[in-house]
Amino acid sequence: MNPPQFIRLFPVTIFGSLPWQLTAAEPGTSTQTTPLSFTILMLLTGALAAAVAYWVYQQYVARPSAPRHENPFSEQCITQTFISALPSLTRELNLEVATSLQTEMLERSDTRRVLGINLGTNLAQIRMPVTYRYHIRLQDPWCLRVQGKSVLVQAPLIRPSQPPAIHTDQMHIEFRRGWCRSGPYELVQQLHHDLTPTLCLYAQDPRRLAFVRETARQSVAEFVRLWLERESQWNRGRFTSIQVQFADEKTLPAAPTLQLAETGAA
């Protein structure tokens, strides 16, 4: 029986317990009746008891419990909390995580023969510094997990920012003409034409990606640290390390990417 039913039946129970005399009186006998004042008193007592019971039910039983606010930095919520904060952390769609300055050299050669006679080889060469930039897409999937005092970050893939930046002010062009050939101007034009597509392919080379991977890892860890600091979750000692794993990595690095000693936590 639930509390409202009990409250509804309570006055009926009280009313039914009153000492009413409902039997018919036989001739020649006197009938005793309950005084009217006593009946009214019992009714008032029953009504008061019902009112008290209803008040107790409303205050301690029917009152809804206060809503539980889930910790936004729990293992279940930290990813969504981080993703929701991204627009306020940066307005860019991509987060630049690494740059690499390399000196590249592109070369073309052409050898001609007539009736078995070698007419010589034309050679053209371009050498220039190139800055490769790498980023991760903020809209790609992220996953953050809490493990003790460590935040485990599964970050999106590292991608090259295309096209690479060519330092044309430091570009050097060299060419050599075969002994019985015209100038290699056509080769130079081909090099210029293929310059950007070739460097874009170089930017995607796994060796260049591996070269900047650890720098990118540190950049992502610092980005997450700044977010934790803004949310007042870092300096309190709640989290003391961050480990970053990229989407193309099968295992989490053994050592923390970024660590703050507990003695340094406020």
Image: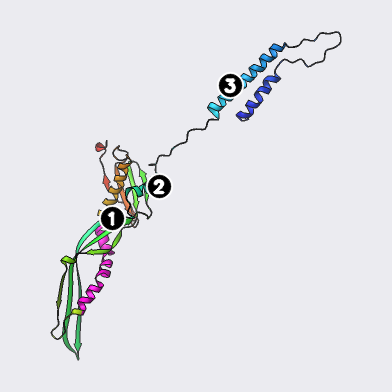
- What amino acid is labelled 2 in the image? Gln
Which residue is at the far right?
Answer: 27
Pointer 2 residue: 80
Quick check: 173 above or below 42? below
The reply to whether residue 254 is in sight is no
Sequence-first disc among 2 and 1: 2
Quadrant in which the N terminus appears? top right
Image: magenta residue range: 186-214
Residue drawn at 62 percent across, 22 percent down: 50
Q: Nearer the viewer, mark 3 or mark 2?
A: 3
How packed mark 2 is, by other alpha carbons closer than 10 Å (few <14, some 14-19, many 20 or more), is some
Judging from the image, what secondary structure is the residue with disc 1 in?
A: strand
Sequence-first disc among 3 and 2: 3
The location of residue 63, given as percent across then percent down, is 53, 30
Judging from the image, what secondary structure is the residue with disc 3 in?
A: helix
What's the magenta bit mostly, secondary-structure-wise?
helix
On residue 52, which mark appears? 3
- The image quarter containing residue 172 is bottom left
On residue 96, which mark appears? 1
The location of residue 150, given as percent across then percent down, is 32, 43
Quadrant in which the C terminus appears? top left
